[in-house]
């Protein structure tokens, strides 16, 4: 995706803020899928899937090359994000099962 041309720092900041709003919306959507995975996965051991992590990283690196984004930066971002999302998935998985057993 090509960035808008900016003439002033005000333009730069407005565009960064616009992109941040889009990123937050996309990350919220991604988190919803992670929460659905917590509901669907049959065991807590299935929450962390090393093969899937490496598959996602490979896809992100490939897409980064296509879009002109540094693949090393993308990998660091995704690994960090995925760790946070996996932590959240563990919590969600536990909470869902706790609610089922206490009902």
Image: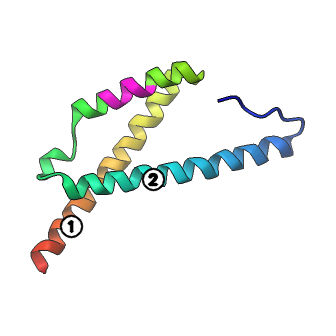
Mark 2 = which residue?
29
Magenta run includes residue 56: yes
In the rendered image, which quarter contains the C terminus?
bottom left
Q: Which residue is depicted at the point 16% across and 45% down? A: 46
- Badge 1, how many Cα within 10 Å: few under 14, some, many 20+? some
Q: Position of residue 89 (x, y in %)?
A: 28, 54
In the rendered image, which quarter contains the N terminus?
top right
Q: How is the image coloured?
A: rainbow
On screen, residue 72 above or below 19: above
Residue 88 seen in the figure: no
Mark 1 against mark 2, which lies toward the viewer? 2
Q: Is residue 97 left or right of residue 85?
A: left
**Which labelled disc corresponds to residue 28?**
none
Mark 1 = which residue?
96
Q: Which residue is depicted at the point 30% across and 52% down? A: 87
- Magenta residues span 55-60
Q: Position of residue 59 (x, y in %)?
A: 39, 26
Magenta run includes residue 48: no
Query: Predominant secondary structure in magenta?
Result: helix
Question: What secondary structure is found at the residue carrying circle 2?
Answer: helix
Q: Position of residue 61 (x, y in %)?
A: 45, 23
Q: Which residue is depicted at the point 23% across and 33% down? A: 50
Residue 32 seen in the figure: yes
- Badge 2, how many Cα within 10 Å: few under 14, some, many 20+? few
């Amino acid at each position: 995706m090509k960035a808008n041309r900016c003439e002033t720092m005000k333009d730069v900041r407005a565009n960064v803020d616009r992109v941040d709003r889009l990123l937050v919306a996309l990350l919220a959507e991604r988190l919803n899928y992670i929460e659905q995975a917590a509901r669907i996965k049959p065991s807590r051991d299935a929450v962390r899937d090393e093969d899937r992590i490496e598959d996602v990283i490979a896809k992100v690196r490939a897409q980064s090359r296509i879009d002109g984004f540094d693949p090393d930066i993308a990998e660091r971002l995704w690994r960090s994000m995925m760790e946070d999302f996996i932590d959240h998935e563990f919590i969600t998985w536990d909470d869902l099962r706790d609610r089922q057993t206490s009902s």
